[in-house]
Amino acid sequence: MDSGATTAPVQRFTAVSAAPVHQIQAVDTPHFSSLRMGALRHDFDRHPLMQLPRLAQLARDLMPAKQCRFIQPDTTQTSAFRHSATAPAGQDIDAVFARIEEPGSWVALYDVQTDPQYAAFLDEVIASAQHLIRREQPGLFRVAGFIFISAPPSVTPFHIDRENNLWLQIRGRKTMTVFDHRDRDLVAAREVENFIIHGSLDKVRLDETLRHRGVDFDVAAGDGVYFPATSPHMTRTTTDWVRPGEGVSISIGVVFYTAVTRHHARVHQCNRVLRNLGLAPVLPGISPWRDAIKAPVGRAIAAARARWRGYEAPPGAY
C-alpha cells in the first residue's frame, strides 16, 4: 500500500522450500480469483510477531525512520488520505502505545519489511498464499507490509493502492469496505492514472452517493480480504465488540506487485499520453491486444521520463 507516501526500501520475495507453518485459504475456493476481491481465512493472528507487545517494539524501531504514521483524530472515510510521521500532540511512540486503547487511537507501521524478522514474516505470508495467486498473476515481486493498530471508533479513509493486497485481521474487529477496481464512477480513469504514475490521491475521495457499491467484509481475528491493485477501499471500527483489555484492532496489509500489475502500469503510462492528446483510451485489462501494443510504448515513456526528468516510475514500469 504505497499510496505514494514512503520511499523506504522494499525487499523482493524469495521463495522458500519449507512449507509455511501458518496458512491462508480462500473462503470460497472454487470461485476465488486474484483478479477480483474475495474473503480469506488465516491463522497468522497466532504468529508471535503479530502480538501487541512485539508490535510496540517494532514501532520503536521504525519511528526514527518516520515509518510510523498517524492521522488526525477527526478523520472520516470521506477525508483525504493524509497522514503524518508526527503523533498527535507530539507524543512519543511509547506514549502512543500506552494509550492505544483510548477511543480513536490510530497508528500505522509502514514498510515493515525493512526489519529482517518482519521481512521473513512477509515471505511466510506470501508463501502460504501462492496457491491463490500464481495461476492468474505470476511473477510476484516487491513485497511490503503495512500494519494498522487502532481503537474504535476509528477509520481509514477511502483510497486506492498500486499493489495487490492480502489484508489480514489479526486482533479485534473491523469492517473493510472494498469496491470494484473497474468502477470508473468511483475513481475516474484520469485519477487512476495520476495515482499509478505520480502517486497522487488528491482527487480520490468517496462519493457518498456511491457508498452502496462497496462490499462490506465484517472481519474478526483470523479473517481477511484479498483485493487487486487500484480497488478502492476503506475501513471502520465500531465499539460494540470492545471489552476491558480487548479494545485494540490490529490488521496487516501484505502488498505485492506481479507481472500483471507491471503490465498495467506500462499501459497507464501510454494511456496518459493518449488522454493528453484528447483521446479516450481503453483502460488496462479490457482489451488484451490493445494492452499488448501500449505496454512497450508505456515502458519507453516511463524510461524517458526517468532519464530526462528525474521521474520515479512505479515498480516495473520500465
Image: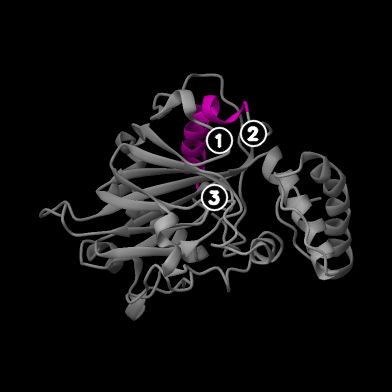
Of the numbered discs in the image, which one, if any, rests on residue 137? 2
> How was this image coloured?
one colour
**Label 1, label 2: how many angstroms apart (C-alpha)?**
7 Å
Q: Amino acid at mark 3?
A: Thr
Cβ–Cβ under 8 Å for marks 1 and 2: yes
Question: Residue 45 lies in what quarter of the image?
Answer: top left
Which residue does the numbered mark 3 point to in the structure image? Answer: 114
Would you say the magenta stretch is mainly helix, strand or loop? helix
Q: Check if residue 312 falls in the magenta segment.
A: no
Find residue 145 and report its horizontal and vertical position in percent: 49, 48
Image position of 133 (left or right of 276) = left
Image position of 233 (left or right of 200) = left
Q: Secondary structure at mark 1?
A: loop
Crowdedness near tag 2: few (<14), some (14–19) or many (≥20) residues, C-alpha within 10 Å: some
Crowdedness near tag 1: few (<14), some (14–19) or many (≥20) residues, C-alpha within 10 Å: some
Query: Which residue is located at x 64 percent, y 36 percent?
Result: 140
Q: Nearer the viewer, residue 206 or 125?
A: 206
Compare marks 1 and 2 and give the one earlier in the sequence.
Answer: 1
- Magenta residues span 114-135
Q: Residue furthest bottom?
A: 89
